[in-house]
Image (spheres, rainbow, N blue to C red):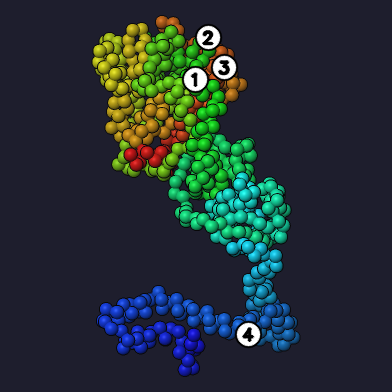
Amino acid sequence: MPALSTGSGNDTGLYELLVALPAQLQPHVDSQEDLTFLWDVFGEKSLHSLVKIHEKLHYYEKQNPVPVLQGAAALANDLAEELQNKPLNSEIRELLKLLSKPNVKALLSVHDTVAQKNYDPVLPPMPDDIDDEEDSVKIIRLVKNREPLGATIKKDEQTGAIVVARIMRGGAADRSGLIHVGDELREVNGILVEDKRPEEIIQILAQSQGAITFKIIPSIKEETPSKEGKMFIKALFDYDPNEDKAIPCKEAGLSFKKGDILQIMSQDDATWWQAKHEGDANPRAGLIPSKHFQERRLALRRPEILVQPLKVSNRKSYEETVESEEIKEDAEYGDISSGTYLAGFRRSFRLSRKDKKTNKSMYECKRSDQYDTADVPTYEEVTPYRRQTNEKYRLVVLVGPVGVGLNELKRKLLISDTQHYGVTVPHTTRPRRSQESDGVEYIFISKHLFETDVQNNKFIEYGEYKNNYYGTSIDSVRSVLAKNKVCLLDVQPHTVKHLRTLEFKPFVIFIKPPSIERLRETRKNAKIISSRDDQGAAKPFTEDDFQEMIKSAQIMESQYGHLFDKTIVNDDLAVAFNELKTTFDKLETDTHWVPVSWLHS
């Protein structure tokens, strides 16, 4: 290689040689096309930049640079002492002031630390006992800090060799690029591992400090490069790897809670995915059970309560606060002294025990024990979504046991802004009364038309009471949304999953009762309307009411909790309302995670 030109000598540098090369080759080129190609190649700016960098590094290396001195801080102290003994003029005063500043002293101290260190790489000596029959051996040295190395190992069942089972995305091993899946591990810090169990090797690694040296036989199979995952999922269950007996390495597991958003980094293993919490600055991934694996084992051990329809005791049902013939509003819990009447304000249909058998869903044909068992909540692929100004509002679905105060919270929301919030107008087949208007209190239709709409799946929920049908239609929801209002809908929890569509993009809020002690304290003066008698009289809460409210809420949460976007405990009505109002405000302005299917249908 020609010597580098410094600008003052006559040596030709590599850069100058590159520039002159096309002209020197011109007599030897047959065609103009070839000459043009040479000019293009050797005139490429990126090639010129690389050559310039090479020359700079080469020149720097030839100079063999070393620090001019290693004790700048001591020299500065000596200088300051000597200047103190001289007549102090303005220049000396300024210099002494400068040398006494903490930041200058710190800079000189750092300079000395850097100057006294040798930064040349130090490689471990090659072992003397390398087996001649081995095709290739890698000696790898990794510096261990507090984080795990990010690799799991296993014993090959056929050969008995210790091999690398997986590399955790973003971990130390992955970032080094030196260890790969399938590599055979022979030694760790000079300790032979071929006769040891994986647990013993992990213990050796755990006890090692500083640099760790591995002797590895590289895998012959090539790994396909994997890009960082762009798939995000919402966890629909809680997971603690320390309690999972099936996980291959508990230390590599990633714990999460129901509702957490996870970024999937690798799905190479059909049983164990690699993931990290969305937004986590730590690049290292952890192991989580794959969707298929989790669904399979959850279906096998699923508690009986999860595959049974929502039930309460035979004594009394919490489904009994609906439609008395007088259509009185159920008091539930809270202050209803305002007397404000809201047209079309009806609680969704909750039939009494004697009429419960006629309560049906628009998707009744799909509901079966087999269907519900197959619907095992594990993960749901999600994507960020923010409502645009010109879009319809998302449907808000309220779920909760009777008596929890859901109706009163809905009422307070409507009263707070009747122009912004709206409710559906129910359908009924009963005769219209003199003081009622069609489309205000109810939409009045014939039995034949009602039954036809039922057959055409036009109702979200419907039921029969005193030989009359009542129901909430899909079109009634669309009607509220079309008015550019937020539609407040409360339904049976099993209906929620059928409303989760691209059209409605529902946000589901579960209104949960507080502890039974707080129920006794806060509801002692409240009343609940029961349809067990013809008058639909309001009666005080009883201890049985409280017990069943708690039980009903527990069943709802265990069976349908994975569908809830928000849970609000109605301990104090004013506090719960404020939390509900804040949730609504954020729903309209903030970015939320929604199912991918809603945006990519």
- What numbered label is drawn on residue 308? 1
The residue lying toward the viewer, choosing from 283 and 186, is 186
Q: Are marks 4 and 2 in contact (CB under 8 Å)?
A: no
Give the residue type at disc 4.
Answer: Glu
- Would residue 68 appear left or right of 465 to someone viewing this image? right
Q: Which residue is found at the position 60% from the left and 40% from the top?
A: 247
Q: Which residue is found at the position 60% from the left and 83% from the top?
A: 64
Name above or below for residue 122 compared with residue 270.
Answer: below
Give the residue type at disc 2.
Answer: Arg
Determine which residue is flagged by label 3.
547
- Between circles 1 and 3, the one closer to the viewer is 1
Q: What separation in Å lies between label 4 and label 2 (alpha carbons)? A: 98 Å
Quick one: SS at disc 2? loop
Position in image of residue 69 (x %, y %):
67, 82
Q: How crowded is mark 3: few (under 14 residues within 10 Å), some or many (20 or more)?
A: few
- What numbered label is drawn on residue 315? 2
- Between circles 4 and 2, the one closer to the viewer is 2
Q: Is residue 33 visible?
A: yes
Determine which residue is flagged by label 4.
91
Position in image of residue 11 (x %, y %):
47, 91
Snapshot quadrant of residue 75:
bottom right
Mark 1 or mark 3: name the one nearer the start of the chain: 1
Mark 4 or mark 2: name the one nearer the start of the chain: 4
Quick one: SS at disc 4? helix
The residue lying toward the viewer, choosing from 230 and 159, is 159
- Would residue 75 appear left or right of 489 to someone viewing this image? right
Q: What separation in Å lies between label 1 and label 4 (alpha carbons)? A: 90 Å
